[in-house]
Image (tube, rainbow, N blue to C red):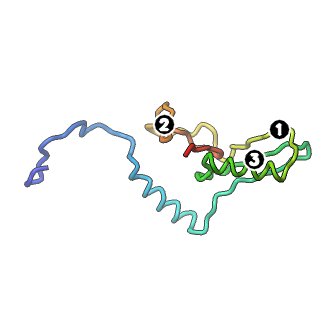
Amino acid sequence: MGGGGNILAAQHARDRFVPASTLKILTALTALHCLGPGYRFRTEFFLTPAHDLLVKGYGDPFLISEVWQDIADHVAKKLHFFKNLLLDDTFFAAGITIPGQGLSTNPYDAPPGALCEIHA
């Protein structure tokens, strides 16, 4: 912008884009306001009567690959046998689409999920 507030140059000024990472600040503040400072994400583990290990997710964004490895190590020490590993990611409604969401494999295009792994 020039000294008088006039635009000197613009590129794609009228095009609409998906908001950048700065939107994370608004998202974090909204989550803090709605959920409160004491909120904790949870992930539940059950052993069914049929000896299947059931993992129920609730959208914990901190379940990165290293945390899953720690969980697997802990389960291996405590649980010597289970038949099947069942993953329950039904906490969020299926088919949620977000305007502007692409089809790439980039993290910002990932759909919402109750059990999502992030490779750190």
Q: Secondary structure at mark 2?
A: loop
Reply above or below: 27 against 12.
below
- For the point 55% across and 39% down, the residue is 111
Sequence order check: which comes first, mark 1 or mark 3?
3
Q: Which residue is mark 3?
A: 55
User: Where residue 91 appears, x then y in whole percent?
Assistant: 68, 47
Q: Is residue 119 left or right of residue 82?
A: left
- For the point 60% across and 68% down, the residue is 38
Sequence order check: which comes first, mark 3 or mark 2?
3
- Name the mark on residue 84: 1
Q: Residues within 10 Å of mark 2 (few under 14, many from 20)?
A: few
Q: Which residue is mark 2?
A: 106
Looking at the image, the residue that sits furthest to the left is 4
Sequence order check: which comes first, mark 2 or mark 1?
1
User: Where residue 106 appears, x then y in whole percent?
Assistant: 48, 36
Q: Secondary structure at mark 3?
A: strand
Q: Is residue 120 left or right of residue 92?
A: left
Q: CA distance from mark 3 to mark 2?
A: 25 Å
Reply above or below: 7 against 3.
above
User: Where residue 35 appears, x then y in whole percent?
Assistant: 57, 63
Q: Residues within 10 Å of mark 3 (few under 14, many from 20)?
A: some
The amino acid at mark 3 is Val
- For the point 39% across and 41% down, the residue is 18
